[in-house]
Amino acid sequence: MIDVLFLPEPVSQQHVCVVVDVLRATSTIVTALANGARCVVPVRTIAEAKKRKAENILICGERKGIKPKGFDLGNSPIEYFTVKDKEVILTTTNGTRAISMINSQKLYAACFLNLHAVIEQLRNHDHVTIVCSGQKGKIAYEDVLCAGAIVYELNDKLTDGARISRELWKQSRRKDLSKLLFESQHAQELAEYGFSSDITFCSQTDLYSIVPVFVEDRFIKQAP
């Protein structure tokens, strides 16, 4: 059975969950690990991130789209090309909040950048819940679209949420993904902040072949 939650909620189960925050937390997590970061540790608050600052540890993230004062990096995935051998502490408005609400046997991070790597990983599991991070407590179009892209290629029983997301992707899959993402409300807000390049970057499909998996308190690359 595959389920899709359009908004994050407390999830506690013995099955598999996938967190999606296309713009931008899971895209940043995937990019950081693909570029050699040792791990990405999601935390809820700015204060908690600052407490963990140390040598070879980067404190990173955003509030209202902008990098907080004193942070090393923001939440723009294109900032994470030079993080080799670093530990990344990440706090964001939506994505890390969603992650903190999930307690499952396995938790993966997905976005368009690692779409088919995640799909192949999920073929090994019978029960999957995809959790969309949303935006400011509201449904985020780009997250539901990505969830639908995942569901579309998995032959399994579907909840209504999974069916709705799949239908959205079926209607959109032949269209220009970058244009679709730019039409979303969240993308328009990011563009106003000057992050249009992030939207273009996050709209690339299968740029990376890694799957972040949550182990203890951090995301690491899933072993081959």
Image: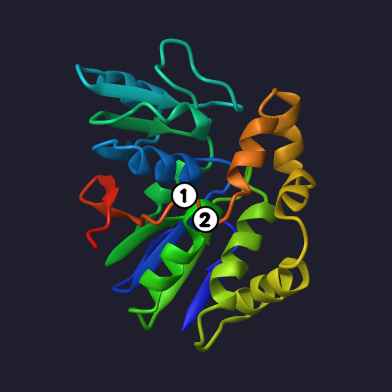
Q: Position of residue 15 (x, y in %)?
A: 33, 74
Q: Is residue 215 left or right of residue 140?
A: left
- The residue sitting at 60% across, 40% down in the picture is 201
- Position above or below: 24 against 6: above
Q: Quadrant of residue 171?
A: bottom right
Query: At x 31% / y 23%, what residue is drawn?
Result: 58
Above or below: residue 55 compared with residue 160: above
Which type of secondary structure does the marked residue at label 2 adopt? loop
Residue drawn at the location 24% of the way across and 45% of the way down: 217
Visible in this render: residue 75? no
What crowding class fits label 1: few (fewer than 14 Cα within 10 Å), some (14-19), or many (20 or more)? many
Q: Circle 1 sits on which residue?
A: 98
Residue type, mark 2 in image: Pro
The amino acid type found where label 1 is placed reads: Ala
What is the x, y in percent for residue 10? 43, 58
Label total for image: 2
Q: Looking at this view, is 177 or 29 the one in front? A: 177
Q: Residue at x 22, y 21 (%)?
A: 56
Q: From the viewer's perspective, is 98 left or right of 64?
A: left
Disc 2 packing (10 Å; few <14; some 14–19; many ≥20): many
Q: Position of residue 198 (x, y in %)?
A: 61, 35
**Which numbered disc flags the more N-terminal residue, 1 or 2?**
2
Q: Which mark is residue 8?
A: 2
Q: Quadrant of residue 80?
A: top left
Label 1: state its secondary structure.
Answer: helix
Residue 189 image offset from top left, x and y in percent: 73, 33
> CB atoms at circles 1 and 2 under 8 Å apart?
yes
